[in-house]
Image: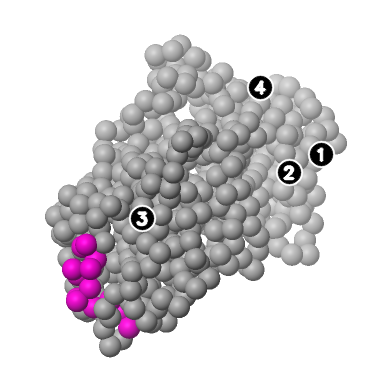
Amino acid sequence: MRVVIAEEMRALDRQATAVYGIPSILLMENAARGLVDQIESARGPSRGRRVVIVAGRGNNGGDGLAAARHFRMRGADVAVYLFSAPEAVAGDAKVSLEIWRRTGGTLHVVGAFDWARFEADLNQADLMIDALFGTGLSHPVDGDLARAIGLINTTRQPGRPRGRVVAIDIPSGISTDTGALCGVAVQADDTVAMGLPKRGHFVGAGLEHRGTLSVVDIGLPDARVQQTPTTPDEAVVTLTARDAMAGCLTPRPRGAHKGTFGHLLVVAGSTGKSGAAALTSRAALRAGCGLVTCAIPKSCGGIFAGLPEAMTLPLPETDAGSLSRDAWNLLTAAMNGKAAVAIGPGLSREKETAALICRLVAETALPMVIDADAINAIASAPSVLQARRGPTILTPHPGEMARLAGVSVEFVQNNRFAIAGDFAKRYNVVVVLKGAHTLVASPTGEIAINDTGHPGMATAGTGDVLTGIIGSLLAQRMTPWYAARLGVWLHGMAGDASSRGSGLIASDLIDHLPQAMAMLADTRSCPVVTIPK
């Protein structure tokens, strides 16, 4: 599923009318009906409910006004608060406003209504529909609009009567393209996106304000929706859901043997961080590769006593217990017969170890996934990536991405799409920028947003598990683009299959990997358009 910026969405709407002859008012009707259908599907019938719709003057307000009519036709008690002079409402929104008025709908206009009445209606509502701005916001929210948003949010405070807040397209006060907060924004329980999800749903304040996201079909032609971006400088951004990954894992041939599924070399661990090496190796085995050898400092081998399935390669170490430069010959010899390399978890930041890592990255032609301390090692000289002859995947968290790109963590988080996409193209690598809705960026300008996982996965070792999964898929000869996307998806799905609370540990993900992989065999129950908060 495409994920768009505001201009792309506007262009798709224009093309639907100009090229395909679909009346724009029909798109608005479809949006309104789809909104009400989605709410009823998730929350039950509208009949007897009190619904307050807070509308602006643009098309988002028009969607809200049209939805008011559909709610009323289904038996709801509906009040509309219009935060615009009626004469300032134009286009399709004006048509929806006139229909609402002519059919006797209740309309309260800003400047003429009683704010105390507005607050009372909000407090008594079962549903509050935010239709103030939508995708058109390009300035900070202030004045009466900020006051209205503040009152909507007040109803969500503990101890207050509370209806459900549903935003149309994107919570008012959130930038569609960046997810940035424009002064103040509606804190929604649910957001119903029209036609396609927007980038602002997945990053920044947009992620925190949207609640549960769903997407409704408004009648855009499929052929047009799947085309490349309407703005040439933008990346092709898609949402990776189960149906997109279902064909990646194929049944194993009857005559297969362990060599059929590749041999992964894991380069990881140091004194005090040997667990990272074990987690990576165990995850790789669970993800299906035939053989795993873990190259570790010689004093760290004890951690593998509980993992008899993995082989180990004890290597010379520094006084600090990290890999020594003297490990080079043994490491290069170990590359023979391997299908891929996973490097980085728990290696430490020792200078001697970092120099060894940089040399290994530059001179090894095998497919490689680079994580953690291997990323930190190359951050001061990312040009070593350009020296690589083999396919490369990097899996930085925001702090590591900041070091790679030479910017602040805040800048990374405010520009996740641009940072990941630009780095992938510049260095010809696949970038997995970890975080809520992890991004996977390809050197060709494609970016995929992952839709699995939850905040309980923010715990020690889960990144090591991801490295093992991706390395395993590379060893099974999957292309880097698919290995990264599938690895991230499986990692998140294993988390979803585990505890969603704070008690989850990284080993839980490994234990649930077979369940996550089995889920790809059946896409019939896939929640393609509903993304949990």
Q: Which residues are magenta?
A: 321-333
Residue highlighted by disc 3:
264
The relative height of residue 503 versus residue 189 in the rendered view (above or below) is below
As shown in the figure, which amino acid type bears the numbered disc 2?
Leu
State the image coordinates of residue 436 (x, y, percent, origin top left): 49, 56
The relative height of residue 175 versus residue 157 in the rendered view (above or below) is above
The relative height of residue 405 versus residue 424 in the rendered view (above or below) is below
State the image coordinates of residue 305 (x, y, percent, origin top left): 50, 73
Magenta span main SS: helix
State the image coordinates of residue 266 (x, y, percent, origin top left): 35, 62
Residue highlighted by disc 4:
99
Instruction: For label 1, count other residues whose C-alpha is less than 10 Å away and answer few (under 14), some (14-19) or many (20+).
Output: some
As shown in the figure, which amino acid type bears the numbered disc 4?
Ile
| SS label for mark 2 | strand
The answer to whether mark 2 and mark 1 are in CB contact below 8 A is yes
Instruction: For label 2, count other residues whose C-alpha is less than 10 Å away and answer few (under 14), some (14-19) or many (20+).
Output: many
Residue highlighted by disc 1:
49
The relative height of residue 164 versus residue 315 in the rendered view (above or below) is above
What's the distance in space between the residues labelled 3 and 2, CA to CA? 53 Å
- Residue 236 in view in this figure: yes
Instruction: For label 4, count other residues whose C-alpha is less than 10 Å away and answer few (under 14), some (14-19) or many (20+).
Output: some
The answer to whether mark 4 and mark 1 are in CB contact below 8 A is no
* Residue 228 shown in magenta: no
Residue at 41% from the left image edge and 69% from the top image edge: 277
As shown in the figure, which amino acid type bears the numbered disc 1?
Arg
The answer to whether mark 3 and mark 2 are in CB contact below 8 A is no
Instruction: For label 3, count other residues whose C-alpha is less than 10 Å away and answer few (under 14), some (14-19) or many (20+).
Output: many
Residue highlighted by disc 2:
127
What's the distance in space between the residues labelled 3 and 4, CA to CA? 65 Å
| SS label for mark 1 | loop
